Amino acid sequence: MSEEAVLRERICLLAKSLYDRGLTHGSTGNISARTADGGLLVSPTGTSFGRLDPARLSRFDGHGRQIDGDAPTKEMPLHTAFYGTRASAGAVVHLHSCHSVALSMMPDVDPEDFLPPLTPYGIMQLGRVRLLPFFLPGDPAMGAAVRGLAGRRSAVVLAHHGPVVAGKDVEAACNAVEELEATARLALLTRGTNARVLSDGEVQAVVSKFDLEWDS
């Protein structure tokens, strides 16, 4: 099996895992990954993460031209914005995960620092997460908003919509978006309980120990 065929199978396997565990639903969510030649494999528009066909993934060459597969997700601007601003991005995942969306609706969430520092793992896998405003689905302005971050964030949450996360490869991106959803769930579960969060010193200790990218 070729390297690209393996990647196609991996994208569909991971997407189905996310779907089967309720992290996205229906035909929501989209996923993409870099190919060895600098191109992209992208989930097609209107498809379900639970039923992606490896042979029908949208295929783009290194110049951004579609060369094979079905029409891509209408949210391609989100994906290309991350690839265009983060050299380390090898994959991008966007979900409509319930707890992340719910937390995005809370009036007192800090847009610059969407997730409270509840565990070291959100810091390790996500860094600071930016909450972006509401956009109509498919609006190219979503991509422009990500580009405006100039590569400083690997994860954002679209208000009333869901998280978008870039990772070094498709496994890393899926792991990180799951961590984002889990942390959002913890934030909602502990909301109003006066739960202790990690102190600034503890956060910096995690950042230093693991040599993390941390946009201050």
Image: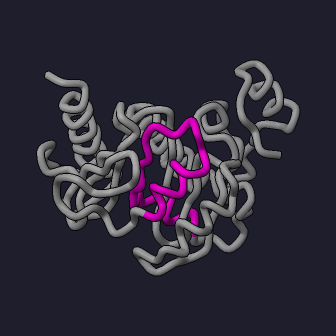
In this rendered view, identify the residue nearer to me: 143 or 178: 143
- Taking the view exactly as shown, the residue that stands out farthest to the bottom is 136
Up-down: is 33 above or below 108?
Answer: above
In this rendered view, identify the residue nearer to me: 63 or 57: 63
Q: Is residue 91 rendered magenta in the image?
A: yes
Q: Residue at x 60, y 61 (%)?
A: 146
Residue 60: x and y in percent read: 30, 51
Q: How many marks?
A: 0
Residue 175: x and y in percent read: 44, 35
Residue 141 visible: yes
Q: Residue at x 36, y 31 (%)?
A: 36
- Image side of residue 150 versus residue 38, left or right: right
- Taking the view exactly as shown, the residue that stands out farthest to the right is 201
Q: Residue at x 24, y 32 (%)?
A: 4
Up-down: is 128 above or below 138?
Answer: above
Q: How is the image coloured?
A: one colour
- Image side of residue 75 versus residue 213, left or right: left
Where, quadrant-wise, is the N terminus in this rendering?
A: top left
Q: Is residue 179 rendered magenta in the image?
A: no
Up-down: is 10 above or below 70?
Answer: above
Question: Which stretch is magenta?
Answer: 77-104
- Image side of residue 199 versus residue 17, left or right: right
